[in-house]
Image (cartoon, helix red, strand yellow):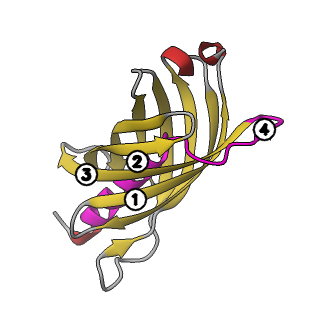
Amino acid sequence: MSSKAVRHLLARAALVAASLAVAGGATAAADGVRFHMETSLQAFPFGSCAGFSLATAGTVKGTHIGQGSWSGTECVGATDTGQAALTAADGAQLFLTFAVITSAPPDANGLIYPRGTFTITGGTGRFAGSSGGGTLTAIASVVTFTAQDTLEGTIRLGPGDA
């Protein structure tokens, strides 16, 4: 796998990981509840798409989701796109899609810094009918295929959280 493919792989993994966990400091907003989320992911190359495909798995932590897990896939290309499901301890899931762009080649430590957006597309249990979105930033290693993501945005909880 080329170094460019690895960079994109890590960038996508970071993006996917960041997109769903809902964490800390929530405050009311006119269009929903503000949230902050942190993720820790591992990427696994598989198959191909317009570029190459990655499966991502890891942990998330957030105010609305609590401690949870991340599972997703992404297509690494000119713009990396993907989808993920976050699963809370009670089994409720939050679904999202994302798109990120990776800047310059990796730095001397093999790190890249993907940035993009995510969209909450629904969920199950207490997240049923939820929507929202925001920005995603990540630090990903093309050496270890790991990523740390941060998602900032808004979630509009559906009737499942009533």
- Element assignment for label 4: strand
Q: Which mark is residue 28?
A: 4
Residue at position x 36%, y 53% in the image: 40
Gap between marks 2 and 3, in whole Å?
A: 10 Å
Which sits earlier in the primary sequence, circle 1 or circle 2?
Answer: 2
36 is within the stretch colored magenta: no
Q: CA distance from mark 3 to mark 1?
A: 11 Å
Q: Camera-side residue: 158 or 28?
A: 28
x and y percentages locating residue 123 in the rendered image = 50, 22
Q: How busy is the neighbourhood of tag 3: few (under 14 within 10 Å), some, or many (20 plus)?
A: many
| Amino acid type at image mark 4 | Ala
Which residue type carries mark 2?
Answer: Ala
As drawn, the label of residue 17 is 2
Label pair 1/2, CB-CB below 8 angstroms: yes
The residue beneath circle 1 is 148
Mark 4 vs 3: CB contact within 8 A? no
Q: CA distance from mark 1 to mark 2?
A: 7 Å
Which residues make up the magenta segment? Answer: 5-32
Q: What's the CA distance linking mark 2 and mark 4?
A: 24 Å
Q: CA distance from mark 4 to mark 1?
A: 26 Å
Does label 2 or label 3 sit earlier along the sequence?
A: 2
